């Protein structure tokens, strides 16, 4: 399996790179940023694109979170254009904010924070279109 991992410095990317180095059936292509075009996907020809979670979105500005969500939206468009699977990971903060109980990952989060709501909108789009 060939995987394209975006946001190379994220700890998830580093862990996947370590794991893939132990396997003969996995090839990783790791890119620095979140930008990927349909032509890049065609050239790389991954089986899936992985986007690590945004670390600590509650401590970021709305502009930073919006820029991340917009980049994910562009990745969705590129992946759909090339019929490539997309795996977008989200921060636990998306599920924790506004709740007194432990994370229930079967429930679509409904955070009070505007930054986190922007990430939920992107997730809603992915669920609706994939």
Image (cartoon, rainbow, N blue to C red):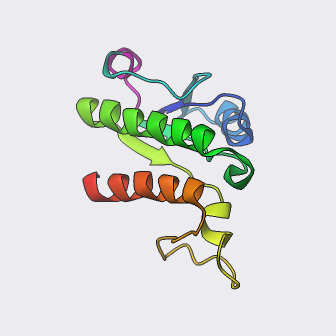
Residue 1 visible to the viewer = no
Residue 62 image-quadrant placement: top right
Number of marks in the rendered image: 0
Left or right, 119 with reference to 74: right
The percent position of residue 3, horizontal first and vertical second, equals 49, 33
Q: On screen, 115 above or below 3? A: below
Q: Is residue 66 visible?
A: yes
Residue placed most toward the observer, 103 or 21: 103
- In the rendered view, tell whether residue 57 sits above or below residue 113: above
Give the image location of residue 61, x and y in percent.
Answer: 67, 44
Looking at the picture, does residue 125 appear above or below residue 92? above
- Front residue of 95 and 3: 95
Q: Residue at x 53, y 29 (%)?
A: 34
Q: Could you tell me which residue is drawn at 70 percent across and 84 percent down?
A: 100
Decide whether the magenta segment is chiefly helix, strand or loop.
helix
Q: Please provide the residue range marked out in magenta.
A: 40-46
**Residue at left offset 38%, top offset 33%:** 74
Q: Residue 64: where, in percent of width, then height?
A: 62, 38
The answer to if 41 sits in the magenta stretch is yes
Task: Name the residue at 47% across, 33% down.
Answer: 71
């Amino acid at each position: 399996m060939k995987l394209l991992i975006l946001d190379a410095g994220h700890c998830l990317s580093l862990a996947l790179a370590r794991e893939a180095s132990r396997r003969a059936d996995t090839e990783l292509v790791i890119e620095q940023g979140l930008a990927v075009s349909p032509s890049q996907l065609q050239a790389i020809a991954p089986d899936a694109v992985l986007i690590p979670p945004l670390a600590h979105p509650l401590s970021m500005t709305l502009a930073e979170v919006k820029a991340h969500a917009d980049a994910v939206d562009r990745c969705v468009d590129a992946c759909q254009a090339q019929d490539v699977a997309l795996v977008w990971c989200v921060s636990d903060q998306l599920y924790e904010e506004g709740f007194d109980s432990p994370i229930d990952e079967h429930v679509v989060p409904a955070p009070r924070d505007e930054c986190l709501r922007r990430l939920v909108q992107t997730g809603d789009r992915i669920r609706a279109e994939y």
